[in-house]
Image: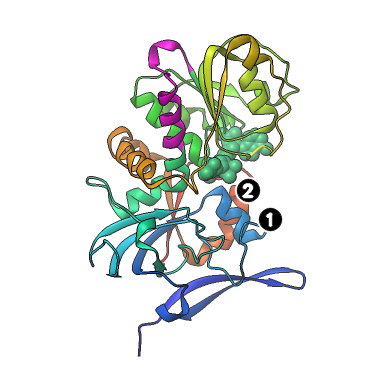
Amino acid sequence: MSERFRALFIDKTDDGQRAEFKDIAVDDLMAGDTVVRVDYSTLNYKDGLVVTGAAPVARTFPMIPGIDLAGTVETSDGDFSPGDKVVLNGYGLSETHFGGYAQKARVQSEWLVPLAGDMTTHDAMAIGTAGYTAMLCVMALEDHGLAPDQGPVLVTGAAGGVGSVAIAVLAKLGYEVAASTGREEEGAYLTGLGAAEIIPRAELSGDPRPLGKERFAGVVDSVGSNTLANALSMTKYGGVVAACGLAGGMDLPASVAPFILRGVSLLGIDSVQAPMEKRRAAWARLDRDLDLSKLEAMTRDVALSDIQNYAPQILAGQVRGRIVVDVNA
Ligand code: NDP
């Protein structure tokens, strides 16, 4: 009889959705050419949406949530060998394909990224989709010509997952980082990651003006809405803003003034459909440009069996840094 393992399923019900653990076999997973024994997944903002049902992220039911995973290849008909350590995020995981909240995953080999350098599966999930997206933001700013001598870089949603990794990476690269947070009590945490200045969230969340004082050469924004509009209005002449998130709202009540009067550029960042070449480059950069001590300082482990307690917390903005999910606990 084939080995059975544990997976979390969510399913629609008449009055919402139900989450339940089931013991299943590989044949119960969706089709794919590679089976991965999962060590860790993570809790990202989007996982919070799926597990609580707060937004319609999952498109087929029942669904195994978990938008990312890291583990060891067990069998593969693709370009991987048993024993290879791999990381996977995006490609519809937890939307149209079973995700990482299970002890095994069956996926397409072309979705997998081999772990870079000495990175462990735990490191990879401490980084997770949030950290990898932070690196996509940094790479986009650099591609647009941003350099440390041009001035401070603003990171919004600073104490969250994307924000924490962005701060640590930018500081290591020599940027002066201004961290915007709604959690005053996290000031020491943020300066520990490398922030030079803490900006209270309220300074950026009010009604935006078309143009404000020029303060930032670059911005990594995971908040959206008024915060992104204010960040645009405070970006210096020729500066660049990477927008990846909506923790504060999906709208963008901005004016075109920063674009047409200051030549500011707004770059959109998507992690889910990013091409494989960019993914591999981002993971290699994370291996090089993110200090493991900083990563440890921002990471907490939780058991998959407790995930339903933590999912609402990330949506409420109460999670600091990154949460690694041990799918075997
Ligand atoms: P987290 O919850 O870890 O971080 C979000 C942070 O935003 C919070 O910690 C908080 O930071 C701040 N925040 C929360 N609510 C509000 C609010 N109402 N107004 C202003 N700030 C708020 O989430 P992640 O880091 O995992 O993800 C951040 C965002 O990026 C999400 O919207 C997510 O969907 C998006 N994302 C997009 C990806 C893409 O492919 N484009 C990939 C990954 C993430 P603080 O307490 O410091 O103020």
Q: Report the span colored magenta.
A: 134-152
Drawn side of residue 21 relative to residue 232, left or right: left
Q: Position of residue 107 (x, y in %)?
A: 40, 65
Instruction: Pick whichever of labels 1 and 2 is earlier in the sequence.
Output: 1
Drawn side of residue 29 relative to residue 77, left or right: right
Q: Position of residue 225 (x, y in %)?
A: 69, 32
> What residue lies at 58% left-to-right and 21% top-to-bottom?
199
* Number of disc labels: 2
**Colour style of the rendered protein structure:** rainbow
> Is the Cβ of the residue at disc 1 closer than 8 Å to that at disc 2?
yes
> Which of the numbered marks, if any, corresponds to residue 54?
1
Q: Is residue 25 visible?
A: no
Please tell me how crowded label 2 is: few (under 14), some (14-19), or many (20+) other residues with Cα within 10 Å.
some
**Helix, strand or loop: magenta stretch:** helix
In the image, residue 162 above or below residue 227: below
Q: Quadrant of ligand 1?
A: top right
Q: Residue flagged by tag 1: what amino acid is it?
A: Ala
The N terminus is located in which quarter?
A: bottom left
Q: Position of residue 217 (x, y in %)?
A: 50, 15
| Frontmost residue, 164 versus 29 | 29
Q: Is residue 100 visible?
A: yes
The residue under label 2 is 315
